[in-house]
Amino acid sequence: MVKTVVTLMLVTLLSSFHSWAKFTVVTELSPPNQTWVNNQVAGVSTELVKAILDIAALEGEFYMYPWARALNTAKDKPNTLIYSMAKTPQREALFHWIGPVALFHLGFVTNQSPRNIQIETLQDARQYRLAVQRDDVAAQVLHRLGFEFIETADIQQSYHLLAANKVDLVVDDPRYISAMAQAMRLPDGHFRYVLDIEPLSVRGYLAASLATSPERVAQLRAAYQQLVDTPLYRRALFE
C-alpha cells in the first residue's frame, strides 16, 4: 500500500513538473521584429510569441542567437520554439509549424554614399559584393539563382560589413532599414533600399521542434488562432 501511494505521488509530481516545463524560445536579431532591449529579447514578433505562450498557459525563456545556431538548437531539443522562420520545402518536415508571426518583403540594401550603386535587375546585382546570413532563406534562394556571397552569422554582422564598405549589398526588408541603422547608432538615412527580390516575399513562422509533444503543439496552435485578427497580430504581420 505504501509503495502504491509513493508511486502515485511520484507520478503526480512528474506530471506536474512536465506541465510546468519551460519552453526554450530562440530567435535572431531582426529589428523591429526581434530586438535586444535592456538585456532581453523584445520586438513586435516577440510580443506576439509571448502572447501565444500566455494564452497557452506555457512559460518561455527567450534567447537571441546567430541564425544558424538558433536553427540547430530548435531542430533537436524538445519544448523548443523558433521564430521568425520562412517555411521552405527543405524545412517543412523538420518542425511543427504554429503560424506566421512576421511578414518580410526582402530585397537588396546598400549604403547611402557617394558611390552610385544602381540596380534595376537581379542581373545588375551580380557585379557587387554581397553578404547573406548563413542558413537563411535568402542564402538558399540566392544560391539557387546563381549568386555568390559572403556568409555571415547574423543580419547585424551583414550590416556591419556593409557599413564598413567591405560588401556592397545585404538583403533585408525596406521597413526594417531605419530600425537597423538606429540599432547600429548610424544616421537614419545611412542605408537605402535598391531592389525587390520577388522570390523573397515570405512569411516568418513560429515553429516547434519535432521532439515537442503533440499536446503542447496543439496548445500553441489553439492559442495562435485566438490572436488572429487582433491588433497585435496585424501589427506583427503588417496587414
Image (cartoon, helix red, strand yellow):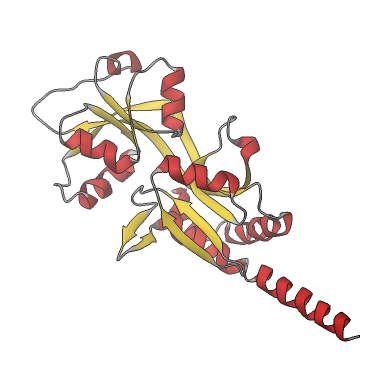
Residue 40 on image: x %, y %: 36, 63
Camera sees residue 30: yes
Q: Residue furthest bottom?
A: 2
Quadrant showing the N terminus: bottom right
Residue 181 on image: x %, y %: 21, 46
Q: Residue furthest front?
A: 3
Which quadrant of the structure image shows residue 201? top left
Residue 77 lies, with reference to residue 90, above or below; the image says below
On the rendered structure, is 157 left or right of 26? left
Residue 180 lies, with reference to residue 128, above or below; the image says below
Which quadrant of the structure image shows residue 111? top left
On the rendered structure, is 196 left or right of 118? right
Q: Residue sitting at 17 percent across and 37 percent down?
A: 163
Q: Residue sitting at 21 percent across and 26 percent down?
A: 168
Q: How many marks?
A: 0
Residue 227 on image: x %, y %: 57, 60
Q: Residue sitting at 20 percent across and 49 percent down?
A: 184
Q: Residue furthest right?
A: 1
Q: Residue sitting at 42 percent across and 30 percent down?
A: 138
Residue 56 lies, with reference to residue 3, above or below; the image says above
Camera sees residue 231: no
Residue 176 on image: x %, y %: 31, 45
Which residue is at the front of the view, 10 or 75? 10
Which residue is at the front of the view, 189 or 231? 189
